[in-house]
Structure formats: C-alpha cells, structure tokens
Image (tube, helix red, strand yellow):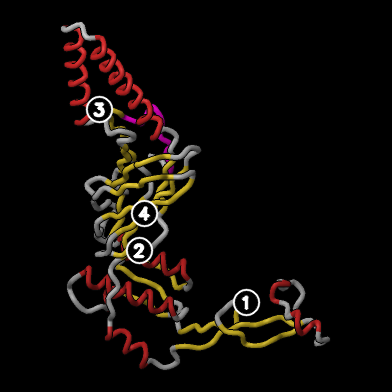
Amino acid sequence: MQSQVTLHRRNIFILPSKFGVVFLVLNILLFILGVNYQNNLVIILSSFCFSLFVTTMLFCYQNMAGLQIKPVLRQEYTAGQLVSVECHLSSEQDKHAIDFCYQRQPLQSVPLVGHQTNVALTLHEKKRGVHQLPRLIVASHYPLGIFRAWSNLEFEQRLIVFPESLPYAEQLSAIEQSDGAYDSKRTTSGDSFSGLEPYREGESLKRVAWKQLAQGKGMLTKQFEQTLGEPQWLDIADIDGQNIELKLSYLAYLVNYFSSLSQPFGLLLGAQKLAIGHGNQHRLDALTMLATYGVNGADYE
C-alpha cells in the first residue's frame, strides 16, 4: 500500500463493456454476412467497425494512464457523521469522464480532470476507532462506452474517528463553582495584548514594538496574556454511567471545552494516562486516546 498511486499498464485493467460485447458480436455477424454474399461495402463497413473497436480500446486506456491519485485527510472525523475524503488528482494530460468511488459506496463522476484538481469522496459514517481506507475504484468508459478501464487502489492512510461530543452538565457545573479556576499567564504568544516591557537580549525581534522605537521610547517588546486555569484531570472513572461510549462522548466534550479555554488538563482512561498539557496538539492526542480506547489496536470496518 502507498500514499500516492500513478495509474499505468500494471494496475489498469480493461475489458469490453456490455455494449462493447454486443458491438463486437454484431460486427462479426456483419463480416460473415459480407463474406457470404461477397458484398464489398459490407466488408468495408465491418473492417471500419473493427478498427473503431481497437482504437477505442487504446483511447480508453490512454485516458486512465498517467493519472496520479493521492487521498488527503484534512478534517477531523467524528462518530455518526459522514466521512469526506479529498483526493488530489494530477496529470500531464487532460482526463475525461473518470468515475471514482470507494468500495460499496455510491459512484461519483468527474466529467473533466485538468492537470490538477481535487475531488471529495463520501464514505458512510464510521464507528469510533481507527479505520483503514477502503479500496478506491477508478473507472472510465471513455470515449464511446465500448470498453471499461478500471483500477482498484489501496492506500496506507488511516482514518481516526473521534467519539461524538456530548455536553456533560454535572462536570461543567463543578468546574464553574470551583475556586480559583482560572488565572492569567504572560506568554510570548496569546490571545490578548497585555503591555510592553524593556527588551531583553536574545528575545525575538518579531516581538519588538517598532512603532514605540520610532517614537524614541526605547527598545520595548510586546507581551501577551493567555488565560490558563488550574490543571484538571479528566478521569473516565469520575463519569457517571455504565455505557462506555457515552462516557467517552462526555470526555470528548470536556476535552474540546478545556481546549477552547486554553486550560491545561490531563486524561486518565484506566491504565492509560495522558500527561497534563494544553494546545491543539494536546487536544488531538486526547481525542485520539479516546478514539482508540478499548479497541486493542484493531481496525473497525
């Protein structure tokens, strides 16, 4: 399996379509009829149809050859929602009427693919967990529908489907009623400007207040504030209920909630532990931990 595939003679299959089989049979009958009655016009017509048959096969193959396909997983995927996978297509030549679909999914046709374009392919909703991308089927009946060229492609990309996010009122109420839940911390980057401080040797020049320097106020650097709360531990054992999926959905909501406030948190799932941290990467690590909890590394299908 690869992350990108180029179509060529080793992975393109081509056979006559149902219409092509009928066309070939009728052409053979036409040729027999012309020979039997020694009718040169009928023989010439049969020869023309046969040459059209062969030429169409070459055009059908050429329309597929050289096409590069690369699935790109750009978004976050949540259980119970349709999954959209974007495929990046590139080719040195124009391609016409190429159909794309994942195995057991509806067909999606791209009438004309230029040198570079993207096509979004839809999958049915997936359960929480890690999923291997299903086989991608690329096909074309160009130009006359006499032949069908196709290729079955497998890619190494995997989908990580996070649990559905459901509000958990009890835990939120406890957080809001706690004392000293949040304070402000000065950082080199943040959401709100907090003031100016004298420049220290070694600080980034990007933070220098050049306007104040031009006004003769000296070398100053900009300071920002970021709201950070007391570290919180999210423990699945503290969530009421017996339904594991529901508890994971509550935790997914809390992970997104704390991340939106830039509040540090850690995650405990039985023996699994995610250290306290904050930021978008920490949020994704926590959601991934929730997505893979209890699946023993097995893929869902």
Residue, x 25% and y 53% (percent of image)?
A: 300
Q: Which residues are magenta?
A: 4-13
Of badges 2 and 1, the one in the foreground is 1
Residue 112 place in picture, x, y as percent: 40, 45
| Mark 2: few/some/many CA within 10 Å (<14, 14-19, 20+) | some
The residue singled out by tag 3 in the image is 16
Q: Please identify, in this view, whether the residue under mark 1 or under mark 3 is nearer the observer.
A: 3
Q: Secondary structure at mark 2?
A: helix
Task: State how far apart marks 2 and 1 are (Cα).
Answer: 29 Å
Find disc 1 in the rendering and name its residue.
Answer: 188
Which label sits in the foreground, 2 or 4? 4
Q: Is residue 198 left or right of residue 174?
A: right
Residue type at mark 2 is Met
Q: Amino acid at mark 1?
A: Thr
Distance between the alpha carbons at the discs numbered 1 and 4: 39 Å
Q: Which comes sooner in the sequence, label 1 or label 4?
A: 4
Residue 3 seen in the current view: no
Distance of label 1 from label 3 (alpha carbons): 65 Å
Q: 231 above or below 300?
A: below
Within the image, what quadrant is residue 36 found in? Answer: top left
**Depth check: 178 or 126 in front?**
126
Residues packed near mark 4 inside 10 Å, few (<14), some (14 to 19) or many (20 plus): some
Q: Residue type at mark 4?
A: Ala
**The residue tagged with tag 1: helix, strand or loop?**
loop
Query: According to the image, label 4 marks what residue?
Result: 120
Q: Nearer the viewer, mark 1 or mark 4?
A: 4
Q: Earlier in the sequence, mark 3 or mark 2?
A: 3
Which image quadrant for residue 141? top left
